[in-house]
Image: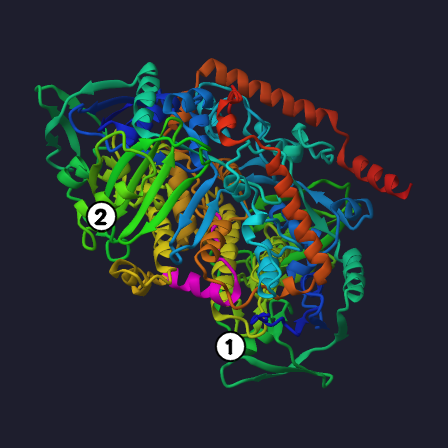
Amino acid sequence: MTDKVRVIIVGGGTAGWMTAAALAALAPAAASVHLVESAEIGIVGVGEATLPHLRAFIERLGIDEAEFMAATHATYKLGIAFENFGDVGDRYIHPFGSYGAPLGGVPFHHYWLRRNAAGAASPISDYSAGVVAAEANRFARPSPNSDAAGAYGYAYQFDATRFGPFLREFATARGALRTEGRVVSVERDGDTGDVRVLVLEDGSRLEGDLFIDCSGFRALLLGGEWAEPWEDWSHWLPCDRAVAVPCSSPDGPIEPYTRAVAMSAGWRWRIPLRHRVGNGYVFSSAHLDEAAATEALLAAIESPPIAEPRMLRFRAGRRRRSWVGNTVAIGLASGFLEPLESTSIYLVQAAITELLEHFPDRRVVPADRDGFNTRIDAEYDRIRDFLILHYHATGRDDSTFWRHARTMRIPDSLEEKVELWRRTGQVAKYSHGLFLEPSWVAVYLGQGILPTGWDPRADVPETAGLDRALERLRRTIADRVATMPDHRSALRLPVPPTAAVRA
Amino acid sequence: MTANRQHELKSVAVFGGGLVALSAALAIARTSPRTRVSLIRTPPDPGALADRLPATLPASGGMLDRLGLSGDQLTAGGAAVHRLGERFNSWGRSGSDWAQGFGTAAPIGAPGVPHQLWLTAAGLGSRTRLSELFPASLLVERSRYVEASNGRSLLSHAEPGFRLSPERLVPVLSELARCAGVQSHDGEISVVERASDGSCDAVTTSRGDRITADLYVDASGPVATLSARMGARSIDWCHLLPADRLLLGRRTTPATPADDYTAIDLGWRAVWSSGDHALTGIGFNGAIDGEARARRVAGDAAGTAELVTVRPGRLALPWTHNVLALGDAACVMGPLGTAGLALAHLHLELLLELWPSAGADPLLVAEYNRRATLRADRLRDWVAALYLVEPRRSSGFWQTPRGAEIPDGLATTLLQFDQRGLVAHHEEDSFSRDDWAQRLLHLGMRPRRPDPIAASANPGVLAAALARTAAATNALADSLPPYPAYLAALSSRRQH
């Protein structure tokens, strides 16, 4: 049996403790885990929305869902409501799940496009159980046996500042060590440049084989020590600030979805938790100054703030490589994309998954790094393109920011996808990675890009029969949603225990 | 009311006489009932192995459904047998005999990837064999199979394809095509008229019929007459798939639910079970060994076996303008694995997904080519691994691929597996990561480093879990009748 790899994680927060928890739970024989975090350096924790993938992560670690939700004050999330993106006054929900079901091998949305062109279709959202439930502020866990038509999934909206500590307890109970302290210097190997020792403020030394840089935007190791170049995406995604403030929960329903409302120089999020609402305005400092953005946010929130607004600075982009030498950056140290589609924690999870797949020996070899980097780069780039679409697919002309978004030159790969959609209603497919066909359909249609053509096979079924089938589907979904409890009640229902054994 | 700017294809002309062409004509007629589909039956090409040795994979099974063919009816009616996997004898580094079935691992009850758990346990002295963790593989070993009646049994982890009988299926598909409105007639491609933009304007047959269509499908076999006249460029795979000659014979033998291959110095022997008889093959390389030697090895003194020549490779772009090549016309996979029809069906499935309208959008065509070539290359790599990885023999045939430049995708797969036992995801892969891991392990590869998750399993718990799984899988195999008995029961059940 080979020696354990000594893994040193720099930085706590969500990224650091997710990594520590995963290694401690899944690979205790292969890795020893030691995390160093400074209590003084603020954790970037604001109300956070997630993707359904997080459920798989929780389950894989053997964490009980009910315990997790209670600890993080989580609510359910069926999707994201985008307002004012395509145009001021527009609104659509991008759900987790699909619209209808294919007929004769032809995706549902082609049939919808046909009837829509005839002015005879109800909104496509009527054919998504996720959207219908979200609009009705209802929630029920999807049954695993439910039919394909309008199937939906769910994720969480939670207090990220509680997620880290929850995982810290989990990880340390499984053997992960924690040291509180600040790294003041780093010792490197003279030949390879590998990081060997972290020296803390109190003089203690942490020796390791593999270093995980979860130090946030500072990127102490990957940016500081290794000086790995940064690929900047601000020409496509100019937002570089976020001002965040929580407010009290209003009376009435808790929305089972996140809101993203486009503003004059960016967009603001609204993430309802159990006992309060998280808000933030993601904006471009080149188009709006910090004071004005703060004012705009405070004017927009619907109840009094319960803390001082906090300002965060960032840049859209990623490190050219996230794994260099014997250092792997996870989280903000590896790259950043604004949380428009709640992808931040997903990227941490993806990095952890790939790290486990490419887990090295005490000596890291290029094949480990290259495999990891290829996968992570692809994840970032794909998400980037999808976010750019949200901005570019706009008719807005009411501010410099939106004029820039509408007229900017977008990546070729995205240009071709949009072109193909415009002409044929087809979505270019990847079997792996985020944002499959229904997501693209949701954003294209939600933001007003209607194709001029659709699959001609959808023209074949006789109209009356097709309309009857559509109506049946719409009613089935509406009926199903009507039986769901409202979100507040659903949150009070017991969460079924997670299966004890995972294969 | 806004009209659909994507106009439907008014007409499609399919060229070819075998199962690939019939599949295409029928599938297209069914998916687009208002499109006029013509089938021009070109003379059979002896080298069209996709038509002559047709077999499906679980990944390609969806096309059988689309064509209105049920596996049940095919097997009960004697038109197909189950193809649960492949047996390889004297193959790989240790020259051992091994079996690989199509399907998933049985539930093991320990966290981690099945082959990694097996490797870890083997390192600790466990005697459980890899195939005991995969029901389909063990059933292939024991030559037993029964269709699962409910989704939860161990049997449901075995996902067979089918070996089809061309003699039985051609008439069935022809009739189905006729009912679907396909107009068929015989013909040989004589003249191809090209428009100024390079697209095909019309095809005239040797009988004088001048055929025009919105889309032309070239399923005419490896000669690929239509594609060749369109100036299609080819990519050669002979260095990776060295068997370019096949000595094809036939013998009576009890049915098995698997293909059987044995490595010999000349190349390999195959037995492809087709119910009450089997086709036999000797695969070899014509430049290295002559026909006479092959016949001697085959014991074919009478010279009755048919010699088939093939040239493994594919078109660089299977779809150009309005001409789409399918089957052997697009890609010659070679005889090992008989993957030609499965690939053709997968490509046909892709066409139905990226269904063109009149004046096929160039972006759509490009997307088809991107995915179709990825699919073909990955399937080629799946077969090439059998030649490239750890061959024990030093004969000319087996040493040929060693000098070949290994394509990137396969090279990465081999490197990652060698390091970590990791199989990364590939787009358009027809096999799962478990499938690849089984193949590479059976060929003799052993990862240098242990998997961290499997290594963290409690050794006692792991050994017990594997032993339990192996016992269950063996019990399943023990409980099943020999395959010929099962086939007989199926067909007699059908008659009642």
**Left or right: where A44 falls relative to A102:** left
Q: Chain of mark 2?
A: A
Specify whether residue A423 is painted magenta: yes
Q: Quadrant of residue B212?
A: bottom right
Q: How many marks?
A: 2
Type of residue at label 2? Asp
**Magenta range:** A413-431
Q: Disc 2 to disc 1, how far (Cα)? A: 52 Å
Q: Position of residue B248 (x, y in %)?
A: 68, 56
Residue A503, placed above or below residue B413? above
* Residue appearing at x 56%, y 46% in the figure: A128
Q: Which mark is residue B355?
A: none
Q: Position of residue A376 (x, y in %)?
A: 34, 44
Q: Residues within 10 Å of mark 2 (few under 14, many from 20)?
A: some
Type of residue at label 1? Gly
- A357, B222: nearer the viewer: A357
Q: Which residue is mark 1?
A: B231
Q: Chain of mark 1?
A: B
Q: Quadrant of the C terminus of chain B?
A: top right
Q: Which residue is mark 2?
A: A240
Residue B398 visible in image: no
Give the structural element (helix, strand or loop) at label 2: loop
Q: Are marks 2 and 1 on the same chain?
A: no
* Residue appearing at x 22%, y 48% in the figure: A240
Q: Position of residue A423 (x, y in %)?
A: 50, 68
Specify whether residue B386 is painted magenta: no
Give the structural element (helix, strand or loop) at label 1: loop
* Residue appearing at x 81%, y 48% in the figure: B78
Q: Quadrant of residue A334?
A: top left
